[in-house]
Amino acid sequence: MRLINNIISVFKYEVLEIARNRVYLITLLILPFATLLFFSTMFYGGSIENLPIVLIDNDHSASSRQLVRMVNATRGVKVKYTSTSIIEAEELLRRGDAYAILLIPEGMERDIYSGNTSQVECYISGTNMSASGVIDSDIQNSIRTFSTGLELAKLTSTGTNTHTATQEVMPINFLTHIISNPYINYGYYLAPIFMFVALALFTTLLTTYAIGRELYYATAQRWMSISSNSTLAAVIGKLLPTTVTMLIFAELNYFVIFKVMGMECAGSHAILTIGGTIFILAYQSIALFITTITSNMRLALSLGGGYTVMAFTFSGITFPTMAMFNAVRPLTNFFPLTWFTKLFVDQAMRGTPIEYSLKPLFSLTLFLVLPLFIGKRLRRITSDKQYWSND
């Protein structure tokens, strides 16, 4: 009972500190909400659409116009510019106004009807891998469909029935079935992870600041006295406002993802909630560990922020962990985001049985033991003046 009373006393003390500190208050309440709003708005559409390309049509035929119409009919590509000069088209590409150049050669229609092969060229900027992938896929599909249509027309014009002609042109049908994210919606995959990366960053910075400012402003003795010199009560009471607020934002993230953006939760929402809770506590544990070890608020903020942001690279979101260099791959396990990403993909997208999510949950829980190693040092730095006002 005494421990609970001490925690409540520190909690009240921290809430008053938050209310008095405008930057602290804004970082705790306003910025996480603004970030959530930003990412949900950015990825609300879900798919990449109408990427601008440059068209150079040197054929000016009915066939070339039909091909252009088919390219424009795709979701991802839009012919926004037309040019007669490759130099002018390349300039648009270099300026970033367009992502690709589609070059239709002179005499394409003549070659088609004379039985010769014609070559349509596409120059794609590789500066944005997502955009280049969409453009390459959409234009290839358009040209493939266009070519198949021509072959069918030739065969049916000779008296071959449509069924037989189709079998001759396409003897093998290739069917692709996208599972877990059948709409190929970027928002379903990227938005949740971006939201939780931001949440991890705010959690780390706020936890670091909450502990570090007691050393920086030499108020550690007052903080500990409010907790009756109970390190456990001091830490829990001080971090509780951040914990509760970040957990509310985690649930708000899920609400936006599943209700506002329309993503279906294929697995257990309860497991996702448990995972989100441990995820927040894991980053608080890491921040507490770094701040206590360094006993320097500025250094801890830099290290904690860098560590949290670096997790995005090692989580496998943008580059598969299985494709990473063997020496680097083990490092992915040292970031809570890696395990949370696996948990989210398994439960939200794949609908994986719960037993397969126990490993990510257990791995996240391992980060919670970090504060056990710094208890003695935390007591030392909060009682020894040599650690205070340390720039």
Image (tube, rainbow, N blue to C red):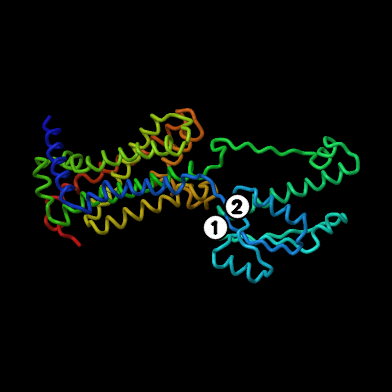
Residue 380 place in picture, x, y as percent: 15, 50
Residue placed most toward the observer, 163 or 188? 163
The reply to whether residue 366 is in sight is: no
Q: Is residue 260 at least partly visible in the picture?
A: yes
Quarter holding the C terminus is bottom left
- Res 367 → quadrant: top left
Mark 1 crowd level (few <14, some 14–19, many ≥20, 10 Å Cα) = few
Tell which of 83 and 129 is nearer to you: 83
> Picture coordinates of residue 217 (x, y %)?
14, 56
Image height of 187 relative to 390, above or below: above
Q: Is residue 317 left or right of residue 218?
A: right
Disc 1: which residue: 128
- Secondary structure under tag 2 reads helix
Position of the N terminus, as image quadrant, is top left
Label whose residue precedes the other's in the sequence (1 or 2): 1
Q: Which residue is mark 2?
A: 133
In the image, what residue type sits under mark 2? Gly
- Establish if 260 lies above or below 110: above
The x and y percentages for residue 88 are: 63, 70
